[in-house]
Image (cartoon, rainbow, N blue to C red):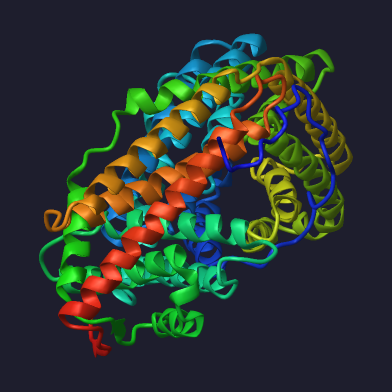
Amino acid sequence: MSSATPTPATSPVRRLSLAGVLRLRRPSEIWFKPALSSVAAVAPPNLLLLAFGRLDLAMYTMAGSLCALYAHNRPYAARARTLAWVVLGMLGGVAVALVTASLTRDAVVLVTVGALLAAVQKVLCDATRIGPPGNVILTFISSAALFVPQTLAQVPGHLALAAAAGVWAWLVGMAPALVRPHGPERRATAQALNAAAAYAATRGAGDGHASLRAAGYAAVQAAWQTLLSLPATGARAATRHALERLVVRAEVALAAPADSDPERLRAWAHALRGGGRIPRTGEAPAETDELLGADAELAARPAPLWQRLGPLTPIAVRTALGCALAGYASLALGIGRPYWALVTAAALYQANITLTWSRAVQRVVGNLAGVLLFAAIAPLAHLGQVLLVLCCLALNFGAEALITRNYWLGSVCVTPMALLVTEFAGYQAPGDLMTERAVDTLVGALVGFLAAVVVTNRRAGNRVEQAVTAADRARERTARLLAEPDPAPGALEAARRGLAAALTDLRATADGAAGEWWGRALPQERVVLAEQSGHRTLAEAVRRQAARADRETGTRTEDVRP
């Protein structure tokens, strides 16, 4: 008989709450880096165009410049590849938009193409985990390009401007490597240690310990993903291995919180700030096995892209349908820029309906407040094109600096910036711009959310079943190795890390499915049992590792310079 208390079946309809939707969070640890990168990438191209009297071409350079917003949490070797793909993806979307705009001026066709582009951009960004800011920037640029009159002869020149600005954005994104070449991986490791310390402080009991444990495992998984993207040999290998040992200590604290010292974990995390020495926990044979386990995980290939796209089909349908209907509704109301409604709808879609509802509220509040801010800024910006460009740069910085506090707060700056960009080709009546933006925001949010409600994600329950099965298999594999007197080097650690990853995925999948409407009842009891037994097995694996380390060499602490 199960020892877990069964939970009631999930209700097919869930209440949508406003509680906490607009609450401000603590700013991101590196909030200023995307903000500064954005300004550094946007300013030179815009100022050059201003000097040549061609500010009307700024939309094309901004397509490349805004690529600098991506990949700030990735190590620089991985960041170089990611930024290159983002630039290519941006150029691909803009190319489709410009060619379409040169072939037809039928607004219905343009909205339809924009909606299909938005769906493709959404699923590709979700499947490859490119974000933040995800698909929104790509959709904003490509949708706006659809409604700019073009000829086929102009397309190559406009794409060349975007490509040149994209190369500059790549250089801006990579520039911090000259100062802190190991910054991203050190930050990811520090976040894992701090999250583990927060859970260890609860001793595995008390209010909120379950959520802290889930957050800790998520931070550890993010740290492993960061470290495993680094080279295993060469000049960076010593730093990678030193950081891996610290992430292992975070895993140990999560599996055995009562036996861990949270202050020591926080001290290690604090020591990772800046470019100083990396704390090292020793070179015990057990730790060597742990790193062999990490190498085994590195050797495992990720699932093919087409397999990752499959579960995102409902999100793709939601995005395409919602964006198309929002654009059509805007056209029916006589709005001259239906892409504003289209982009509003595209920005809503999150992992489930509950999160989509929250984003819809945040989007409406932020955009309407941004329209009011535009009313205050417009008189100053209209004094000259230099002030227009400077106001846009200031708003660009503010948007990236504030958006980590809450999406709506960043939107307060994004909205007036987007309105000012439309005036690069010539000043317009502020009242008309404000009215159209407000109406398109409301239309896009309403129609986009209704499309999300209509297109249900019935695969969410299946994904929970699959995640439970994967967690059970990972637990059984770890348990079999624990039963062996002397498992192969690295095998137990690879199995333990696989179990931790499976449990993290199970919790994320269950949370995502719980926020869907009209779904079938979720196997809540199986989820609870899988998590309980999985974490017990993790704790046993940690005890085996700790006992081996104490028996063979103990633990010593020393410093090593990266």
Q: Is residue 336 left or right of residue 93?
A: right
- 375 relative position to 304: left or right: right
Residue most toward the front? 1
Is residue 150 something that shows in the picture?
no
Q: In which quarter of the image is the C terminus?
A: bottom left
Residue 376 in sight from this viewpoint: yes
Q: Nearer the viewer, residue 431 or 226?
A: 226
Tell me residue 394's x, y (percent).
66, 63
Which image quadrant for residue 542? Answer: bottom left
Q: Which residue is drawn at 41% across and 55% down?
A: 222
Number of callouts: 0
**299 to 323, vertically: above or below:** below
Give the residue drawn at x 48%, y 62%.
37
Q: Quadrant of the N terminus?
A: top right
Above or below residue 1? Residue 77 is below
Q: Which of 513 and 199 is in front in this view?
A: 199
- The structure residue drawn at horizontal position 57% and vertical position 47%, both measured from the top left corner, is 55
Q: In which quarter of the image is residue 28?
A: bottom right
Q: Is residue 219 above or below residue 112?
A: below
What x and y, as percent, mark residue 9? 70, 27
Q: Where is residue 500 in the image (x, y as percent from the top left)?
A: 39, 51
Q: Horizontal placement of 107 versus 180: left or right?
A: right
Which of the 4 image quarters holds residue 305?
A: top left
Q: Position of residue 315 (x, y in %)?
A: 57, 24
User: Looking at the image, which residue is at 38% across and 67% down?
Assistant: 252
